[in-house]
Image (cartoon, coloured by chain):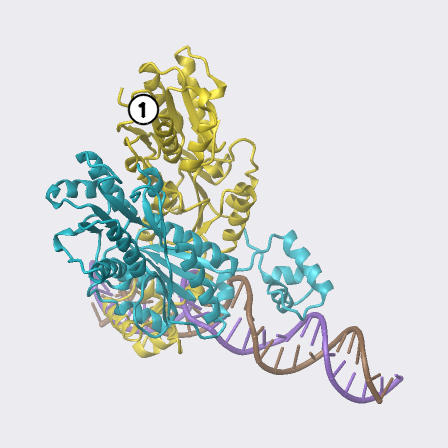
Chain colours: A cyan, B yellow, C brown, D purple
Amino acid sequence: MGVRVNIYDIAKLAGVSIATVSRVVNDSPNVNDKTKEKVRKVMEENHYMPNEFARGLGRSFVKAVGLVCPAISDDYMAKAVACLEKRLREHGYDCILHCSGYDKEDKRQAVGMILKKRIDALMLIGSNFAGGKEEDTSYICEAARQIPVFMINGYVEGENIYGILADDYQAVYDATEELIFAGKRRILFLSNSDSFSAMQKRKGYEDAHKNHGLPILEELNICVENTINGTKDQLLLRRDLAFDGVIATEDGLAVGALKYAKATGISVPEEISVVGYNNSELSISCEPELTTVDARGEILCKTAVDSMMTLLEGKRINSKTIIKCHLVKRHTTDF
Amino acid sequence: MGVRVNIYDIAKLAGVSIATVSRVVNDSPNVNDKTKEKVRKVMEENHYMPNEFARGLGRSFVKAVGLVCPAISDDYMAKAVACLEKRLREHGYDCILHCSGYDKEDKRQAVGMILKKRIDALMLIGSNFAGGKEEDTSYICEAARQIPVFMINGYVEGENIYGILADDYQAVYDATEELIFAGKRRILFLSNSDSFSAMQKRKGYEDAHKNHGLPILEELNICVENTINGTKDQLLLRRDLAFDGVIATEDGLAVGALKYAKATGISVPEEISVVGYNNSELSISCEPELTTVDARGEILCKTAVDSMMTLLEGKRINSKTIIKCHLVKRHTTDF
DNA sequence: TGCATATGTGTAAGAGCTTACATTTTAAAA
DNA sequence: TTTTAAAATGTAAGCTCTTACACATATGCA
């Protein structure tokens, strides 16, 4: 639309050189205050907006970071994106978002595409990027050869890759232990993937059992789709399980278990204890309100951004940071 | 890290001119297939990635659109962002995201900031941008002077501004009418803002009453915070209202009403009918499952992107598109 | 074979900034 | 007042592409 004013126009109107205008734009200290003011006035009057492309061309950095997440409609990731975006913006960074989907190949493609854009760093959100069982994560290492990669709730070994993780292992260990203390002996482990964090959680569940001399019952390890009704339906097909507790790796799954209980006339928390994960809004909307793990998404994101800033300043940072979670007790674990 | 290969390197290695390389990058039709292949091979071997800044500088368009939404942790907006991003990417467009917050001044600032980036179009997500009562929306018009502005579920009169809206008026009119048919005479209207869409919904509520010769009871017009427990708490302070139905402008509010009913021993749907809005996951997690309006977010987003593409092709498009919603009946309105 | 088109490729001029270096102005010291 | 250093400003090269235009080669047809 129309002709855009550029640095030459401003220079001419203000009676200075383009270098001076550029210096004013970048708030360089060695410009006379009067000149600065004069140029600023002209810029405002003419609605001057520096062309970001031209600026980027003449510089080595970009002030943008790429955000990739499998699904932004997931409450946990949405909050993470919001938090990262806000904090990055405070530092003057733009966010380019790419929702990849959960598929292996889609994730790889997403990372490839976003790398083509000029970005100063890449942030991968969610444990789904951590590889899980034997998923190939070499594309993440390749990305890290170009720019630093920060993984929120994930980690892949490698140069220039930084993981910021919740202590999912400990969180589930503690929750499981609590159910064990309350006398539960058939605790369902309800997950929806074999992501890195799901594996950590599983390990917490298993170790809690082991350390209390209890057997790990494989029939109680159930993997479902991450939808409330999908979970309910799948549990309805397995009424034989006769579990007395549930550790779910997502709140949605826990709510599904609650619906299952409702449908079969089992009372919660009297007959079954249920623990969710993520402390999402779902955990309040259900009945009874869900005991759930606060996975500290905000803190993870804050740490990631702080680390990034530190790194870009040329300092060293830890390649792995682990942050403690805590259990939010509501009413599905009233013993 | 290290030195980046540029178009000159590729041209030299492939034995062609940089113009040809550029044409290959842009998949221009008038390059010989053999040449194309040869150049592509060299590009791959050397991991060539065109510098987006230089590209942007030499062109009038950018292949990026700015997305501004008040809060991405809102389920409706998260889904919208995901949907827009996916579709825009299919057309080769990047998305620069900016979560503004709900504050008037923050929204204006967000739009201002994102305009400084080079983007081909701006998409404002959510009715919160539509101005509501007497909020100043001149900054949207100003933005539209530079690039087309698409408003998802909002509208502001102006050149180069395009609104794609759900028919909130009709949706609420119909839902209200249904409650009226079921004999409800004290229907609570539960909202959390005076945004454009909230006003449309209110109008639907009022007109349904008017057209059936029923009075509009002002004490039943309640504005709360959009949190489940906030809503519950506020309703608990107004036990005198004695309503027999609820029309909520968000699912969260409806769930809050459900919690209120639970807390006070009122049974749903027997004593109170409840209708939510947006068909979010919350509407399934609660008990009983919520009857809610599907506001057709996906369709709105698809339409917005399609319109944008049409516009950028130089064709004309409607400045306002309205899309019908439909009611998803679950169990809070079993009569 | 020769001429008119169509197709493919190259040349060079931008696009709008940043910044090293050169130059001028100002201020401080002698 | 002159000298010297510091501060302010200007000049011009460079960043990596796109694309109008020019030119060369290939194709079709008489």
Quadrant hosting residue D13: bottom right
Residue pointed to by mark 1: B267
Across and down, in percent, residue A43 comes to 64, 56
In the image, A264 versus B71, the foreground residue is: A264
- What chain letter is assigned to the residue under label 1? B
Across and down, in percent, residue B110 comes to 51, 49
- The correct choice, above or below, for A106 with respect to B195 in the image is below
Is residue A73 visible in the rendered structure shown here? no
Left or right placement of residue B239 versus residue D27 in this view: right
User: Given the image, on which type of amino acid does mark 1 rest?
Assistant: Ser
Outermost top residue: B213
Across and down, in percent, residue B158 comes to 51, 36
Across and down, in percent, residue B38 comes to 25, 72
At 63% from the left and 60% from the top, the residue drawn is: A10
Q: Check disc 1: other Cα within 10 Å, few if <14, some if 14-19, many if 20+.
A: some
- The correct choice, above or below, for B40 with respect to B106 in the image is below
Left or right placement of residue A91 versus residue B169 in this view: right
At 32% from the left and 75% from the top, the residue drawn is: B16
Outermost left residue: A240
In the image, A281 versus D5, the foreground residue is: A281
Quadrant hosting residue B127: top left
Secondary-structure class at tag 1: loop
Q: Quadrant of the C terminus of chain B?
A: top left
Is residue A268 visible in the rendered structure shown here? yes
Left or right placement of residue B69 versus residue B290 in this view: right
Number of marks in the image? 1
In the image, B320 versus B203, the foreground residue is: B203
